Amino acid sequence: MMNITKEQVDALHAVVKIEVQPSDYQPRVNEVIKSYQKTANVPGFRPGKVPAGIIKKMYGKAVLVEELNKLLSESLGKYIYDNKLEVIGSPLPKKSEKEQVFEDGAGFEFSYELGIAPSFELRMPDSKIPYYVLKVDDKMVDDDITDIRRRYGKFSNPEVSEASHILYGEFTELNDDGEVKEGGNRTTTSLAIEMIRNEDFRKPFIGLKKGDTVRFNPLKSLPSEAEVAAMLRTGKDSPALSADYIFTVTTINQIDKAELNQELFDKLYGEGAVTTEEEFRNKVRESIAQYFVKESDRKLKKDLRNVLLEGNEIPLPDDFLKRMLKANQEKEKAEHEFDHEYYHLAEDLRWSLIQNKVASSNDIIISEEEVKALSVQVIRQQFAQYGYYEMEQDKLDEMSVRYLNEEGNYDRLERTLRENKVFEHLRQQIQLDNIELSYTDFVDKLREKTNHELEHH
């Protein structure tokens, strides 16, 4: 029977020694040899009749090494689990003083270094942490209402284009001489005239009729390179992106905005829930504010993480972790690059330890039902992007099972739920300083890098 012992080198570092006897591995090796006998194709012997001695001579050492590795991995994992060792990183095989000779019937001794998770008390911040909230102004409400009226409006097809119209037509790439380029890019799509910000570039598109053409350069006329690439259905590195085009009008579309009346209010909020324009504006204002709460929370999560990391000294087995990473890296990295990556890995590990501490101390657990519910929500969101909002529950449940069986999805969703619960618990333990900001200042604050990030990124 295997003998497993642990030597505690220091608080963050241990060595586990595993002594393996022939009786521990020989039954496994013999089983594999027997299976090889059934399938081995050796000249001079009928299939399935090759003597075990020949199979052992051919494959014995490779089988022994493979089965030893499996046995060691299983035994070490079970030892860590049974003894409730909180390890960091992966066990690191320790080189023996003399070279190991793998012979069937021999005894073996293997040693593994372990990084041990530190013990610490979590200190919460004494001072308030800023919580940035968007101040929803009248312009934001007006813009959102305009967008709602467009989405619920009706399409019509006027004969002559105006600045607010959307043109549908064909883009044809031109060569340097202004002629249609042979084999050039050609695509049919929509063009919203109001997206052309420059008035001089926009003028030629006003007063057009079906069949009219305009020569222009989309990349120079529209504000976003990504939008132009998507519109022309071409890559960002393609010469066709910066070329001149002839645009031929096929259809002129106009959206007649929905009226602000009871019919629209009922469509949006249910019958009788909103009855006046003032109530509607308040609903819109609340909706905008609620949307940006997610951004406020995301900023708070980042700030809270930095505050807790800076306010708690959590030691790690740095030497062990660095040796483990270097042993597993495919390509050797420059020292400064490795140190930079290790710094961020260590930060992530410390944050993970803090989250584990909060979760275990407060009985925060995630149920299978919660993971399944989140998977259904993820699937709904994915289909909503393509305009599918109503789906049968049976179909959703079936897709949820497939989704959660895909590698990594269950663990990822469980981790997301756990992080959210830990954040909500921490939020109750700190004092917040609510700071209301205009949209511009709010966005700037979200993009702002902390001193910590400026120093280490």
Image (cartoon, helix red, strand yellow):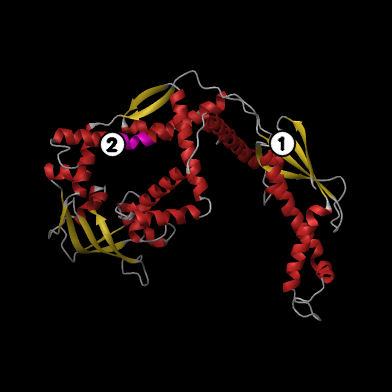
Q: Amino acid at mark 2?
A: Ile
Q: Residue 386, position in %: x, y?
A: 33, 56
What x and y, as percent, mark residue 76? Answer: 72, 45
**Foreground residue, 354 or 358?**
358
Q: Residue at x 34, y 60 (%)?
A: 232
Q: Give the numbered dot on residue 288.
A: 2
Q: In the picture provided, is 50 more to the left or to the right than 272?
A: right
Q: Secondary structure at mark 1?
A: helix
Label located before the other in sequence (2 or 1): 2
Q: Is residue 117 visible?
A: yes
What is the magenta segment's predominant secondary structure?
helix
Considering only vertical position in the picture, is 417 above or below 233? Answer: above
Q: Nearer the viewer, residue 362 or 158?
A: 362
- Residue 130, compared with residue 21, is above or below; it is above
Q: Position of residue 134 (x, y in %)?
A: 32, 31
Mark 2 lies on a secondary structure that is helix
- Frontmost residue, 453 versus 182: 453
Residue at 75% across, 63% down: 31
Q: Is residue 449 visible?
A: no
Amino acid carrying label 1: it is Asp
The residue pinned by badge 1 equals 319
Quadrant position of residue 316 = top right
Structural distance between the alpha carbons of marks 2 and 1: 49 Å
Part of the protein shown in magenta:
288-294
Q: Is residue 2 left or right of residue 152?
A: right
Q: Is residue 180 magenta?
A: no
